[in-house]
Protein backbone atom coordinates (compact mmCIF):
# COMPACT_ATOMS: atom_id res chain seq x y z
CA UNK A 1 0.00 0.00 0.00
CA UNK A 2 1.36 3.44 -0.95
CA UNK A 3 2.29 5.76 1.87
CA UNK A 4 0.11 8.82 2.35
CA UNK A 5 1.88 12.02 1.29
CA UNK A 6 2.06 15.01 3.61
CA UNK A 7 3.46 18.40 2.58
CA UNK A 8 5.26 20.23 5.42
CA UNK A 9 5.81 23.94 4.78
CA UNK A 10 7.99 25.98 7.14
CA UNK A 11 10.94 28.33 6.58
CA UNK A 12 12.74 26.84 9.61
CA UNK A 13 14.60 23.72 8.53
CA UNK A 14 14.82 22.45 12.12
CA UNK A 15 11.05 22.65 12.49
CA UNK A 16 10.54 20.80 9.20
CA UNK A 17 12.96 18.08 10.28
CA UNK A 18 11.27 17.71 13.67
CA UNK A 19 7.83 17.31 12.13
CA UNK A 20 9.13 15.11 9.32
CA UNK A 21 10.90 12.72 11.68
CA UNK A 22 7.74 12.13 13.71
CA UNK A 23 5.61 11.65 10.58
CA UNK A 24 8.09 9.29 8.91
CA UNK A 25 8.04 7.13 12.05
CA UNK A 26 4.29 6.75 11.46
CA UNK A 27 4.98 5.60 7.89
CA UNK A 28 3.99 8.78 6.05
CA UNK A 29 5.84 10.12 3.02
CA UNK A 30 6.86 13.72 3.72
CA UNK A 31 7.55 16.47 1.19
CA UNK A 32 9.20 19.68 2.39
CA UNK A 33 8.99 23.31 1.30
CA UNK A 34 10.72 26.34 2.80
CA UNK A 35 8.19 28.97 1.72
CA UNK A 36 4.74 29.33 0.20
CA UNK A 37 5.87 29.70 -3.40
CA UNK A 38 7.92 26.50 -3.22
CA UNK A 39 4.98 24.78 -1.51
CA UNK A 40 2.58 25.67 -4.33
CA UNK A 41 5.01 24.36 -6.94
CA UNK A 42 5.29 21.06 -5.05
CA UNK A 43 1.56 20.84 -4.40
CA UNK A 44 0.53 21.25 -8.03
CA UNK A 45 3.25 19.02 -9.48
CA UNK A 46 2.74 16.16 -7.00
CA UNK A 47 -0.26 13.87 -7.21
CA UNK A 48 -2.04 12.55 -4.16
CA UNK A 49 -0.97 14.93 -1.38
CA UNK A 50 -3.29 13.92 1.47
CA UNK A 51 -2.66 16.79 3.90
CA UNK A 52 -0.72 20.06 4.19
CA UNK A 53 0.99 21.35 7.36
CA UNK A 54 1.49 25.05 6.76
CA UNK A 55 3.40 27.69 8.73
CA UNK A 56 2.06 31.27 8.74
CA UNK A 57 5.17 33.46 8.85
CA UNK A 58 7.35 32.73 5.79
CA UNK A 59 9.32 34.71 3.19
CA UNK A 60 8.18 35.22 -0.42
CA UNK A 61 4.64 34.01 0.26
CA UNK A 62 3.13 33.63 3.73
CA UNK A 63 0.86 30.85 4.94
CA UNK A 64 -2.37 32.82 4.51
CA UNK A 65 -1.77 33.47 0.81
CA UNK A 66 -0.56 29.90 0.28
CA UNK A 67 -3.74 28.61 1.89
CA UNK A 68 -5.87 30.83 -0.36
CA UNK A 69 -4.12 29.55 -3.46
CA UNK A 70 -4.56 25.91 -2.44
CA UNK A 71 -8.20 26.42 -1.47
CA UNK A 72 -8.98 27.83 -4.91
CA UNK A 73 -8.30 24.38 -6.33
CA UNK A 74 -8.46 21.81 -3.55
CA UNK A 75 -10.22 20.81 -0.32
CA UNK A 76 -7.14 18.96 0.93
CA UNK A 77 -7.00 19.18 4.76
CA UNK A 78 -4.73 21.98 6.00
CA UNK A 79 -3.18 22.28 9.46
CA UNK A 80 -1.88 25.80 10.10
CA UNK A 81 1.10 26.43 12.37
CA UNK A 82 1.75 29.85 13.87
CA UNK A 83 3.84 31.50 16.56
CA UNK A 84 0.96 33.86 17.25
CA UNK A 85 -1.87 33.07 19.64
CA UNK A 86 -4.18 35.94 18.70
CA UNK A 87 -7.79 34.82 18.35
CA UNK A 88 -8.12 36.99 15.24
CA UNK A 89 -5.47 34.89 13.53
CA UNK A 90 -7.32 31.72 14.42
CA UNK A 91 -10.60 33.09 13.06
CA UNK A 92 -8.84 34.22 9.88
CA UNK A 93 -7.53 30.69 9.47
CA UNK A 94 -11.02 29.24 9.74
CA UNK A 95 -12.32 31.83 7.27
CA UNK A 96 -9.75 30.59 4.76
CA UNK A 97 -10.77 26.97 5.25
CA UNK A 98 -8.05 25.84 7.65
CA UNK A 99 -9.05 22.55 9.26
CA UNK A 100 -6.82 22.61 12.34
CA UNK A 101 -4.91 25.48 13.94
CA UNK A 102 -1.89 24.86 16.21
CA UNK A 103 0.15 27.54 17.97
CA UNK A 104 3.91 27.17 18.43
CA UNK A 105 5.45 25.75 20.51
CA UNK A 106 3.54 22.50 20.25
CA UNK A 107 4.04 18.83 20.96
CA UNK A 108 5.00 16.92 17.78
CA UNK A 109 3.13 13.92 19.16
CA UNK A 110 -0.06 15.99 19.38
CA UNK A 111 0.47 17.27 15.85
CA UNK A 112 0.88 13.70 14.57
CA UNK A 113 -2.24 12.64 16.50
CA UNK A 114 -4.26 15.37 14.80
CA UNK A 115 -2.85 14.41 11.40
CA UNK A 116 -3.87 10.80 12.01
CA UNK A 117 -7.33 11.82 13.20
CA UNK A 118 -7.99 13.83 10.04
CA UNK A 119 -6.62 11.19 7.69
CA UNK A 120 -8.45 8.41 9.52
CA UNK A 121 -11.74 10.16 8.90
CA UNK A 122 -11.00 10.95 5.25
CA UNK A 123 -9.79 7.44 4.43
CA UNK A 124 -12.53 5.52 6.22
CA UNK A 125 -15.41 6.77 4.15
CA UNK A 126 -17.24 4.11 2.14
CA UNK A 127 -18.54 4.80 -1.34
CA UNK A 128 -22.19 4.37 -0.35
CA UNK A 129 -22.01 6.41 2.84
CA UNK A 130 -24.61 9.05 2.01
CA UNK A 131 -26.53 11.02 4.63
CA UNK A 132 -29.64 13.04 3.87
CA UNK A 133 -32.30 15.08 5.65
CA UNK A 134 -34.49 18.05 4.79
CA UNK A 135 -33.14 18.47 1.27
CA UNK A 136 -29.54 18.16 2.45
CA UNK A 137 -27.50 15.32 0.96
CA UNK A 138 -23.97 14.59 2.15
CA UNK A 139 -21.76 12.09 0.35
CA UNK A 140 -18.79 11.19 2.55
CA UNK A 141 -16.89 9.32 -0.15
CA UNK A 142 -17.09 12.17 -2.65
CA UNK A 143 -16.78 14.85 0.06
CA UNK A 144 -19.81 16.54 -1.49
CA UNK A 145 -22.81 18.32 0.02
CA UNK A 146 -25.85 19.51 -1.89
CA UNK A 147 -28.82 21.60 -0.75
CA UNK A 148 -31.87 20.76 -2.86
CA UNK A 149 -29.46 19.54 -5.52
CA UNK A 150 -27.22 22.64 -5.45
CA UNK A 151 -23.58 21.99 -4.41
CA UNK A 152 -22.49 23.58 -1.12
CA UNK A 153 -18.85 24.60 -0.65
CA UNK A 154 -17.65 23.65 2.85
CA UNK A 155 -14.26 23.44 4.51
CA UNK A 156 -13.10 20.04 5.72
CA UNK A 157 -14.11 20.78 9.31
CA UNK A 158 -17.47 22.26 8.33
CA UNK A 159 -18.11 19.11 6.31
CA UNK A 160 -17.24 16.89 9.29
CA UNK A 161 -19.45 18.95 11.60
CA UNK A 162 -22.45 18.74 9.27
CA UNK A 163 -21.91 14.99 8.85
CA UNK A 164 -21.91 14.57 12.62
CA UNK A 165 -25.13 16.56 12.93
CA UNK A 166 -26.81 14.48 10.21
CA UNK A 167 -25.68 11.24 11.84
CA UNK A 168 -27.24 12.38 15.13
CA UNK A 169 -30.43 14.03 13.88
CA UNK A 170 -32.82 14.90 16.70
CA UNK A 171 -30.23 14.26 19.43
CA UNK A 172 -29.04 17.01 21.78
CA UNK A 173 -25.24 17.23 21.52
CA UNK A 174 -23.07 18.95 24.11
CA UNK A 175 -20.12 21.05 22.97
CA UNK A 176 -17.83 18.59 24.74
CA UNK A 177 -19.31 15.67 22.80
CA UNK A 178 -18.93 17.55 19.52
CA UNK A 179 -15.30 18.42 20.35
CA UNK A 180 -14.52 14.81 21.23
CA UNK A 181 -16.05 13.40 18.05
CA UNK A 182 -15.41 16.04 15.37
CA UNK A 183 -12.16 17.55 16.64
CA UNK A 184 -11.04 14.29 18.29
CA UNK A 185 -10.03 13.61 21.88
CA UNK A 186 -6.62 15.23 21.55
CA UNK A 187 -7.92 18.69 20.63
CA UNK A 188 -7.18 21.27 23.32
CA UNK A 189 -9.36 24.07 22.03
CA UNK A 190 -12.52 25.41 23.60
CA UNK A 191 -16.20 25.87 22.83
CA UNK A 192 -15.57 29.02 20.78
CA UNK A 193 -14.14 26.81 18.05
CA UNK A 194 -17.46 24.96 17.73
CA UNK A 195 -19.54 28.13 17.92
CA UNK A 196 -17.45 29.76 15.18
CA UNK A 197 -17.86 26.76 12.87
CA UNK A 198 -21.59 26.45 13.56
CA UNK A 199 -22.06 30.14 12.75
CA UNK A 200 -20.23 29.78 9.43
CA UNK A 201 -22.03 26.54 8.60
CA UNK A 202 -25.45 28.07 9.28
CA UNK A 203 -24.59 31.05 7.11
CA UNK A 204 -23.56 28.86 4.19
CA UNK A 205 -26.70 26.72 4.53
CA UNK A 206 -29.07 29.67 4.19
CA UNK A 207 -32.60 28.89 5.39
CA UNK A 208 -31.56 25.31 6.12
CA UNK A 209 -29.15 26.65 8.72
CA UNK A 210 -32.21 26.86 10.99
CA UNK A 211 -32.06 23.06 11.27
CA UNK A 212 -29.05 23.52 13.59
CA UNK A 213 -30.72 24.61 16.79
CA UNK A 214 -28.90 26.08 19.78
CA UNK A 215 -29.52 24.46 23.14
CA UNK A 216 -28.57 27.21 25.55
CA UNK A 217 -26.02 26.21 28.16
CA UNK A 218 -25.38 22.86 26.48
CA UNK A 219 -24.72 22.74 22.75
CA UNK A 220 -26.66 22.06 19.58
CA UNK A 221 -29.25 19.79 18.00
CA UNK A 222 -29.83 19.15 14.30
CA UNK A 223 -33.56 18.83 13.69
CA UNK A 224 -35.55 19.12 10.49
CA UNK A 225 -38.91 20.83 11.02
CA UNK A 226 -41.92 18.79 10.03
Image: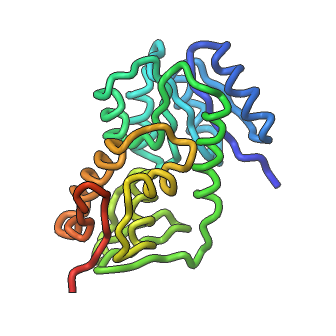
Q: Is residue 226 above or below residue 180?
A: below
Closer to us: 14 or 149: 14
Of residues 110 and 146, which is closer to you in this image? 110
Position of residue 89 measured from the top left corner of the image (x, y, whole percent): 33, 27
Q: Position of residue 189 (x, y in %)?
A: 43, 38
| Name of the residue lying farthest toward the left | 207
Rendered-image quadrant of the N terminus:
bottom right
Kindly give the residue lying farthest to the front in the view shown. Answer: 217
The residue drawn where x is 57% and y is 79% is 128
Residue reaching furthest to the bottom: 226
Decide if residue 84 is on the left or right side of residue 125.
Answer: left
Tell me where residue 115 sits by quadrant.
top right
**Residue 28 % position (x, y):** 75, 40
Q: Look at the image and name its color scheme.
A: rainbow
**Number of numbered discs present?**
0
State the image quarter where residue 129 is shown. bottom right
Compared across the picture, whether 10 is left or right of 148 comes to right
From the image, which quarter does the C terminus lie in? Answer: bottom left
- Residue at image location 28% in from the left, 75% down from the top: 223
Residue found at x 67% / y 32%: 109
Depth check, front residue: 89 or 10: 89
Task: Specify whether 219 is left or right of 28.
Answer: left
Residue drawn at (74%, 30%) of the image: 22
Amino acid sequence: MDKLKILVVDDESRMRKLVKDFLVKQNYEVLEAGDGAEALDLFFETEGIALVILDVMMPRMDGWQTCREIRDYSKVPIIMLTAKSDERDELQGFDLGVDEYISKPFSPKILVARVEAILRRTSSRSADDILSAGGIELNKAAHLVTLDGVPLDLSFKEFELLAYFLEHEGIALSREKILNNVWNYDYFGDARTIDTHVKKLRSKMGNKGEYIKTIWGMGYKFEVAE
